Image: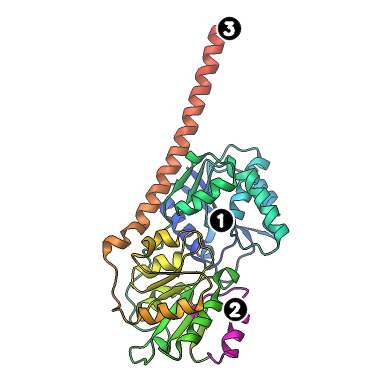
Amino acid sequence: MKIALLVARSDRSYAVRHVVDLAYDLLDRGHEVRVVSVLKPADGGFVEEMGDLHICLNSISMSAGVSSFGNLMKTGAPEVIISAGSRANCVAGLSRKMAGSFTRLMFLEQEVPGYEDFGNPLVAKFWAWMQSRTYPHADRIIVPSYEVKRRLLSRIEVNESAVKEFLNPGQGYFTPPIKAPHPWLTEARNEPTFVSAGTLDKNADLQTLIAGIERTQSSLPCKAIILGDGPEKKRLVELSRSKGLQNHIAFSSDIENLHDYVYFSDGLVSTALSSACPDAVIRAMELSSRIICTVSPGGSRQVLGSGRYGKMLRMQDPDALAHALYEAMQQPKSKPAERDIGRFDRAEFFERIHREIIDMMTLETSAESIGASAKMLAIEAY
């Protein structure tokens, strides 16, 4: 079966990492697979590792990618398109229409509907309109949590039976590290050190983390290492320095080695304002019972079992975060039981995706059979 996987851009994000791993899984199952990225790739993106299996459209914008992908489909349409992220989903839907193809569509929803960080209200309105034109025509929409499903159904008229709810897991990349990845994480350290990770944008709300670390200095001095890159990184570095926290807050781009950081750290903190599927939290749960996460729209509450597997906080509350950091240090650090993290098995996720693909093609075959039978009956009646 010919399958195309569409992403907005090849970068080092977890979302792209999942798509690449899914592509390799489908290859192992005997399918012909290509991963297509719309925009020019970031330096060292995950998809570049796939070599000839990667096609980059090099479009100047996501909307310009519609015609590029549509023209590519005209040269040889795949049987299934799996796209990841709301913008890539829209490009996939409109490109299929432009190419006049009957390719099956599967959307992997990675944002929380209504909380996408588009910045410009006019841009947000444009993409909301695009979603209303494309999402109803998807054969499958895979969402990571009930909260995302509920918001999606309330905003866009889609067939509820096409929306399937299961987590996009982050388990499976880890082998125990030998050496601490940062000087602050050595066993000889005097101060507790926490880790936060993700795209450094306004949605991450890392100013709350910085303020929380500042408040802890009088009672329980601790440190934080912030992993990732993004448009807010420069401002956050300047903010931490202006508060005199340059020796308590460090920044690193080494997000790919999140597991190593969590393994040697005293826990993970997520202050995100929304997260459809909190990948960093899921990955950290494999290694630490000290997880501190905001109760943001999306999957955080579901992933942490409403607080059973980690501390849940109000959003944008530095005082609550400082208290949670203090409480975390009063509890022994331990790895959660295997039964708690078994929900995030990657092999099961890939298997479920494959079953959905087969179901989509079975429905298509059934529809064609019904159409052929009806045509035959019409000829006989004539």
Q: Position of residue 339 (x, y in %)?
A: 27, 60
Residue 65 rendering spot, x and y as whole percentages: 67, 54
Which residue type carries mark 2?
Answer: Lys
User: Considering only vertical position in the picture, is 18 above or below 189?
Assistant: above
Q: CA distance from mark 2 to mark 3?
A: 72 Å
Residue at x 61%, y 86% (from the top left corner): 238
Tell me the element at label 1: loop
Kindly report which numbered mark, 1 or 3, lies closer to the viewer in this rendering: 1
The one nearer the camera, 346 or 101, is: 346
Region rendered in magenta: 226-245
Task: Reply yes or no: does residue 283 show up in magenta.
Answer: no
Q: Position of residue 371 (x, y in %)?
A: 53, 22
Q: CA distance from mark 1 to mark 2?
A: 23 Å
Q: How many neighbours does mark 2 have within 10 angstroms: few (below 14), some (14-19), or many (20 or more)?
A: some
User: Residue type at mark 3?
Assistant: Tyr
Q: Residue 382 has which mark?
A: 3
Q: Residue at x 57, y 63 (%)?
A: 10
Q: Is residue 95 above or below residue 217?
A: above
Residue occupying the far top of the picture: 382
Left or right, 291 with respect to 247, comes to: left
Sequence-wise, the earlier of marks 1 and 3 is 1
Q: Which residue, given by chain and number where applicable, does mark 1 sit on?
A: 85
Q: CA distance from mark 1 to mark 3?
A: 49 Å
User: Of the numbered discs in the image, which one, if any, rests on residue 233?
Assistant: 2
Which is nearer the N-term, disc 2 or disc 3?
2
Q: Give the colour scheme shown.
A: rainbow
Q: Is residue 266 visible?
A: no
- Which residue sits furthest right? 122
